[in-house]
Amino acid sequence: MPLRALIFDVDGTLAHTEREGHLPACNEAFARLGYPVRWTWEEFKPMLPIPGNAQRMRAALGRLGEAFPPEEIEARVKALVELKRRLYVEEYDVPRLLAALCLTPAQGGVEPCSTRAGVSGLGQGGAC
């Protein structure tokens, strides 16, 4: 059977997505939503074992010294995570990776597999 697809796990494995994608997207999400949080790589790197940006962002909001009710914290974290995910895909990771691969979306594709759409595209001619 001829090769029909090639799948790469590029989230920090083949590309420096943590430092050059996730970190700036997190910082921009904090800034756009008005939070005085800006992580350096030295601050972000020890947080990498913490699974998911939601937990990291929740902890950062807790350190701001403002007493938010739990439901408000969750709403704020949800807004941060959604914005960060959009920024990461649209501005920091996918366009840069496509440019590095010299591909246009019509020639090839990259889709984050951490989303339901990314996973469902597998096996249906989608790239993930």
Image (tube, rainbow, N blue to C red):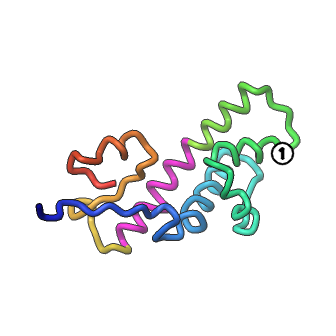
Q: Amino acid at mark 1?
A: Leu
Q: Residue furthest left?
A: 1
The residue tagged with tag 1: helix, strand or loop?
A: loop
Magenta stretch containing residue 87, yes or no? yes
**For this rendering, which residue is in front, 97 or 49?**
49
Location of residue 66 with respect to 108 vertically, above or below: above
Q: What residue is at 85 percent from the left and 37 percent from the top? A: 66
Instruction: Say which quadrant the N terminus sits in.
Output: bottom left
Asked if the stretch drawn in magenta spans residue 78, the answer is no
Q: Position of residue 101 (x, y in %)?
A: 33, 73
Q: Is residue 43 left or right of residue 54?
A: right
* Residue at mark 1: 64
Question: Where does residue 128 sit, x and y in percent of width and height?
Answer: 34, 54
The boundaries of the magenta stretch are 82-99
The spot of residue 51 in percent (x, y) is 63, 48
**Residue positioned 72% across, 41% down in the render:** 58
Q: Quadrant of residue 102?
A: bottom left
Task: Please provide percent x and percent y for residue 65.
Answer: 88, 42
